[in-house]
Amino acid sequence: MWSTPAVDDALGLVYLPLGNQQPDFWGGKRPPLTEKFSSAIVALDMATGRERWTYQTVHHDIWDYDVAAQPALYDIPDGKGGKIPALVQLTKRGQIFMLDRRSGKPIAEVLEKPVPQDHAAGDWVARTQPYSTGMPALGAAPLTEQDMWGATFFDQLACRISFRKLNYKGEFTAPSTQDTLIYPGYYGGFNWGGAAVDESNGYMFVNDIRMPQVVKLVPRETVDVAKLTSGHGVGSTYPMDGTPFVIDHKAFNSPLGIPCQSPPWGVFAAIDLKTRKKVWERPAGTVEDAVINGVRAKLPIPLGMPTLGGGVSTASGLVFYAGTQDYYLRAMDIATGREVWKGRLPVGGQATPMTYVSPASGRQYVVVVAGGARQSPDRGDYVIAYALPKKQ
């Protein structure tokens, strides 16, 4: 578990969102307990530490689709005057699972659907994967050649040609010795920070990343592993010790360094947990502070950029969010997605804001840590507080 757990004091349960076992992209030697708990939510009895239930969001995960977001706990009206204690889990796949947090059984319908069966030597794939059809999925539609995009005609053409050459049969195309497209991708979908829930109206606020990656398994005997320069994510090679392969990673970008699929590449959205419908969706931020090939865009165009972090909602119906590629803390109307205020930060942020009321003055504050947006060259070490003017 590398995310944050959630706790239900009344039920005496702690909910752990679990990762998968290294190596991420080849699983031929994983033991049975890994196959059970990988990329799952596990409920433990707080008094004993024993497993109460387990719900897996990906079977035999060889795509790095670990559960990265903290579970959200909310009581859902049952239509009979009572409430069902629910756990809402965001996933990197863009799927949203709604479970009964007492038992781990789905409240919103989940279907096991057949997936492609091709796989690398020595590995295997599950016959089916779970799809949360009773909840909206964000950024989960398969990519097509018509989705290819470019700032110019020429890089759009290059992206269309590249797309045709890729090994891609949809979301669960297993990594192979060909360049293989992974989408929604191992950055998400939904990643750090989790959801913000406005309990007064049952709205859940989320941010969604749309960044496909290209991976390739390279037979180990063809590589001098001692000379590999490994890193993290795109642009790196993982040695994957103990397997027949190393794996290369790269972004699915145009020759100009821009994502090949059409924007938005990140969105804000609100989900009504009572109706289980998407209420609104907006591009997440602008390209104002994006640096592409060493050049800062400086254009406040709301294309919607990849995000990291979470939001915080207030009783006034606002949600505050700072995890965009541009350097702002924003306040949005949770009912409509309309931006009602933004404050410029010295650098970008990935932290979830917090809010509190001063016991001394009675003023409400919103505080955010700004250390630098991911992929940004600008770094800092700031803790910044905002409040309404005293006269208000």
Image (cartoon, rainbow, N blue to C red):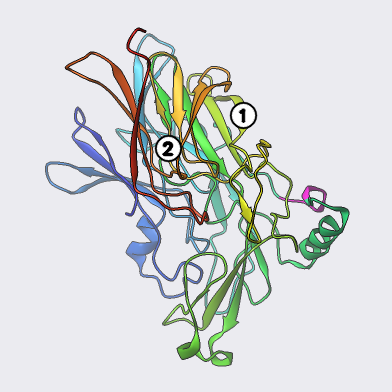
Residue 212 placement (x, y as % from top left): 63, 56
Q: Earlier in the sequence, mark 2 or mark 1?
A: 1
For image coordinates 48% across by 19% down, the residue present is: 274
Q: Nearer the viewer, residue 131 or 206?
A: 206
State yes or no: residue 343 in magenta.
Answer: no
Circle 1 sits on which residue?
Answer: 281
Residue 9 placement (x, y as % from top left): 19, 30
Q: Nearer the viewer, residue 132 or 161?
A: 161
Mark 2: few, some, or many residues within 10 Å (few <14, many ≥20)? Answer: many
Magenta portion: prevailing SS class: helix
Q: CA distance from mark 2 to mark 1?
A: 16 Å
Q: Nearer the viewer, residue 193 or 365?
A: 365
Q: Nearer the viewer, residue 59 or 289?
A: 289
Looking at the rendering, which quadrant does residue 368 occupy?
top left
Quadrant that contains the C terminus: top left
State yes or no: residue 146 in magenta.
Answer: yes
Q: Are marks 2 and 1 in contact (CB under 8 Å)?
A: no
Q: Which mark is residue 177?
A: none
Q: Secondary structure at mark 1?
A: strand
Circle 2 sits on which residue?
Answer: 310
For image coordinates 66% across by 67% down, the residue present is: 180
For image coordinates 57% across by 55% down, the residue present is: 185
Instruction: Say what amino acid the circle numbered 1 marks.
Output: Glu
Instruction: Say what amino acid the circle numbered 2 marks.
Output: Gly
Magenta-colored span:
143-147
Mark 1: few, some, or many residues within 10 Å (few <14, many ≥20)? Answer: some
